[in-house]
Image: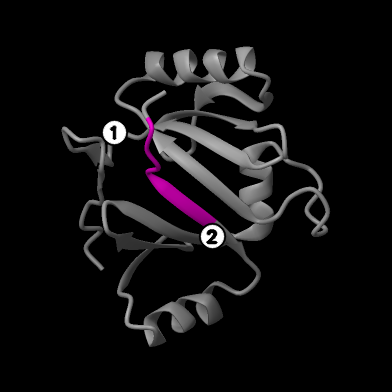
Amino acid sequence: MEQRLSLITLGVTDLERSRRFYEQLGWRGQEVEETVFFEAGGIVLVLWCREKLALDSGVTDTDRGSFDGVVLAHNVRSEEEVRQVLAAAARAGATVTRPSGETFYGGYAACFTDPDGHVWEISYNPGFRLAEDGSIILPDFGT
């Protein structure tokens, strides 16, 4: 697993309120299908419904118990790399919360938690290119 972070997804309870907050801080985002994406210096900050984020990550405790509403993502260049990174994480002691598989957005991903319960998503998303240095390139969604 390359040492880098691609996206940080925050599970929010009110998407519009959260978007307005970040925009008042001077951030400019793009909204697509009830998800807001903000470019943030080579990584992307994402706002998405907290319950949907938990379900997508394979985490069931959303009552502010074990799920803190944050998912860290490491984007890779192929489906095979998703499987390789997930296997390496499992060997290192991760708990797989969502096995490798196709995603609703046309990609391929898996999720695991580290020993302290922090959720990581390993994702191949053909719509989000990676630069040579591994930084993510957010497409223009036309918004």
Bounds of the magenta span?
3-9
Q: Residue 51: x, y in percent?
A: 69, 55
- Relative to residue 63, is residue 61 depicted above or below? above
Question: What is the distance, in whole Å, between disc 2 and disc 1 at their CAs?
Answer: 20 Å
Q: Residue 65: x, y in percent?
A: 83, 54
Q: Which mark is residue 65?
A: none
Q: Residue 50: x, y in percent?
A: 65, 59
Question: Is residue 8 covered in magenta?
Answer: yes
Residue, x 25% and y 42% (percent of image)? 135
Q: Label 1 amino acid?
A: Pro
Residue lying furthest bottom in this view? 24
Choose the circle earlier in sequence order: 2 or 1. Answer: 2
Q: How are the colours assigned in the image?
A: one colour
- Relative to residue 27, is residue 133 depicted above or below? above
* Residue occupied by mark 2: 48
* Residue occupied by mark 1: 126
Crowd band around label 1 with a 10 angstrom C-alpha radius: few (<14), some (14–19), many (20+)? some
Q: Is residue 36 left or right of residue 111?
A: left
Residue, x 18% and y 38% (percent of image)? 131
* SS at mark 1 in the image: loop
- Relative to residue 131, is residue 19 depicted above or below? below
Question: Is residue 139 covered in magenta?
Answer: no
Q: Label 2 amino acid?
A: Trp
Q: Is residue 23 left or right of residue 142?
A: right
